[in-house]
Amino acid sequence: EPEVTQTPSHQVTQMGQEVILRCVPISNHLYFYWYRQILGQKVEFLVSFYNNEISEKSEIFDDQFSVERPDGSNFTLKIRSTKLEDSAMYFCASSEARDGWSEQFFGPGTRLTVL
Amino acid sequence: AQTVTQSQPEMSVQEAETVTLSCTYDTSESDYYLFWYKQPPSRQMILVIRQEAYKQQNATENRFSVNFQKAAKSFSLKISDSQLGDAAMYFCAYKWRNSGYALNFGKGTSLLVTP
């Protein structure tokens, strides 16, 4: 069964460093998402992406964040200058369509630890 | 503000018994969709069941069913004949058109299944 994959599973970085989190969505999906979950808190939406453009973004997704689909398979989230409060689990998701009913398929997540 | 409330941080059920996880939400939208996701210890979220708000009939997927009370803005999940593999974090979520169909999650309920 096709699934969303994410690398790395765990990333440790120093405050102020840039990190890139990678995701490979399901191959025939056209809509991509990033969510994050700070330990003990709820999963929060960051950004959605379609046709090489950001469709929606939350207040969390400020200028420190960017997303890209550099080739036909990868979907990346870049944090330019990490802060301690960026420590969280980051989930990538993809879906066939952008509507209410469509299922978003989630990857296993990347745990980001900022020291 | 659009919020999802899961009032039970933890629940416990014996194998083969039935358990109900509660979820309430607050929205002024008329067109929205409700979901329950399961996040096992491996941390990949899996869709359990979904419901369209304009459908009166409660959704059912094998041992999983929902009690959707639109007027009360309640969307509880019932798990029948609980199995050890049901132990996980369960997230209630919804999405609506004006948010670009990004998922809005509750804080989750941790379900423990005892033999």
Image (cartoon, rainbow, N blue to C red):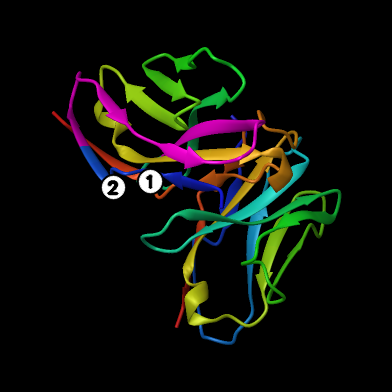
Give the residue at mark 2: B9
- Quarter-wise, where is residue B110 in the image? top left
From the top left corner, tell me how far across and down residue A14 is, in percent. 51, 85
User: Are the two marked residues, 2 and 1, in contact with CB atoms closer than 8 angstroms?
Assistant: yes
Q: In which quarter of the image is the C terminus of chain B?
A: top left
Is residue A77 placed above or below A34 in the rendered structure? below
Dot placed on the residue nearer the N-terminal end, 2 or 1:
2
Graded by Cα atoms within 10 Å as few (under 14), some (14 to 19) or many (20 or more), the crowding at tag 2 reads few
From the top left corner, tell me how far across and down residue A93 is, in percent. 62, 46
Asked if residue B35 can be seen in this view, the reply is yes
Q: For residue A35: magenta? A: no
Question: Is label 2 on the same chain as label 1?
Answer: yes
Q: How far apart are marks 2 and 1 (CA)?
A: 7 Å
Chain letter for the residue marked with disc 2 in the picture: B
Is residue A69 placed above or below A87 in the rendered structure? above
Mark 1 is on which residue type? Answer: Gly
Give the residue at mark 1: B108
Residue B10 lies left or right of residue B27; in this view the side is: left
Q: Residue at x 56, y 53 (%)?
A: B1
Question: Which residue is more in the foreground, B101 or B110?
Answer: B101
Residue B59 lies left or right of residue A80; in this view the side is: left
Chain letter for the residue marked with disc 1 in the picture: B
Q: Is mark 1 on a helix, strand or loop?
A: loop
